[in-house]
């Protein structure tokens, strides 16, 4: 028995739902597929997505107000009925025809969280989408062996299965500023509660590449939120590479120097990061400056 939950916002979900529905229907199991639209602004996308209601055991619901990533995932889980929940983001697509079966084979009485992994397209995208693609391939695409080195911090919430019992203990935090680092908090909560993450090779391909401009803006917001979460005690500074590095710089009183450098070279850095050959070294430095500025301002 399996509940498959997919939140969507301004994205055509039909191809993904058709594939998932075909795969799970081929298995002799009870299932439900819940797709909740978080008040999309595109009426045409909502109209097109409503076609999935014709599929058996599919429930499509459009929310009257936008409630955000964390809240909609919690709502999907609350409205689902089966003991195991598979969460998928709207902008992914399974890399194998037995994607659902692979997850189902790993379900047991001991199952808590299972993460299948992520891939990105092999061909380079448009120049203005390069930053998201390079970051994803260099930082998020990891083998099972690599993920097992840090099983909680190398877990992403775009493709995972969880027992209802474990989800009820964790849930997504709905009070995060800008709704960034919801997956980080979720993973660290699991670690603190001793809830293990099983890593398997069952990837999806991330298909919703953002423009470099948008991704850079979101990354800045993410760095700022991480500083807030560390300052408020929700995340330990040692828990992420960014906050750990920033912590050292703060201890050695080098933060203002890094901030000054980022301010001086900001335009040049952003020009590179929006180019067809973005540097991950510059990207990390940019995020570090954003973190430090935010951390010092909230002290």
Image (tube, helix red, strand yellow):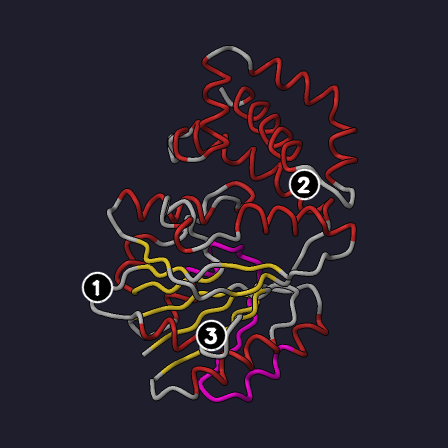
Q: Which residues are magenta?
A: 49-74
What residue is at 56 percent from the left and 43 percent from the top? 178
Q: Is residue 42 on the magenta stretch?
A: no
Is tag 1's residue or tag 2's residue first in the polypeptide sequence? 1
Is tag 3's residue or tag 1's residue first in the polypeptide sequence? 3
Whether pointer 1 and pointer 2 mark residues with C-beta atoms closer than 8 Å, the reply is no
Q: Is residue 65 on the magenta stretch?
A: yes
Q: Residue 1: x percent and y percent?
A: 31, 79
The one nearer the camera, 101 or 56, is 101
Q: Residue 250: x percent and y percent?
A: 49, 16
What residue is at 63 percent from the left and 32 percent from the top? 281
* Residue that mark 3 sits on: 34
Rendering quarter of residue 265: top right
* Residue that mark 1 sits on: 110
Rendering quarter of residue 171: bottom left
Q: Nearer the viewer, mark 3 or mark 1?
A: 1
**CA distance separating discs 2 and 3:** 31 Å
Helix, strand, or loop for circle 3?
strand
* Residue that mark 2 sits on: 217
């Amino acid at each position: 028995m399996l509940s498959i939950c997919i939140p969507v916002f301004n994205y055509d979900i039909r191809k993904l739902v058709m594939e998932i529905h075909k795969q799970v229907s081929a298995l002799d199991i009870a299932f439900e597929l819940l797709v909740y639209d978080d008040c999309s602004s595109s009426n045409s996308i909502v109209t097109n997505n409503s076609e999935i209601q014709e599929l058996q055991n599919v429930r499509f619901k459009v929310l009257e107000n936008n409630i955000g990533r964390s809240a909609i995932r919690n709502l999907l889980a609350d409205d689902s009925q089966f003991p195991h929940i598979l969460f998928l983001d709207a902008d992914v697509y399974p890399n194998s025809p037995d994607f659902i079966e692979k997850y189902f084979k790993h379900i047991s009485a001991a199952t808590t969280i299972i993460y299948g992994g992520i891939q990105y397209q092999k061909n380079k995208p448009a120049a203005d989408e390069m930053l998201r693609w390079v970051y994803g391939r260099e930082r998020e695409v990891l083998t099972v062996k690599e993920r097992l080195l840090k099983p909680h911090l190398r877990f992403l919430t775009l493709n995972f299965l969880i027992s209802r019992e474990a989800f009820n203990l964790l849930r997504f935090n709905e009070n995060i500023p800008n709704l960034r680092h919801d997956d980080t908090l979720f993973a660290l909560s699991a670690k603190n509660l001793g809830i293990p993450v099983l890593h398997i090779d069952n990837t999806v391909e991330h298909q919703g590449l953002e423009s470099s401009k948008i991704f850079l803006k979101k990354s800045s917001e993410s760095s700022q939120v991480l500083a807030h979460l560390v300052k408020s005690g929700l995340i330990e500074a040692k828990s992420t590479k960014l906050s750990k590095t920033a912590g050292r710089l703060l201890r050695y009183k080098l933060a203002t120097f890094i901030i000054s450098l980022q301010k001086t070279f900001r335009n040049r850095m952003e020009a590179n990061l929006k180019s067809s050959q973005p540097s991950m070294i510059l990207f990390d430095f940019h995020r570090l400056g954003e973190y430090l500025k935010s951390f010092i301002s909230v002290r």
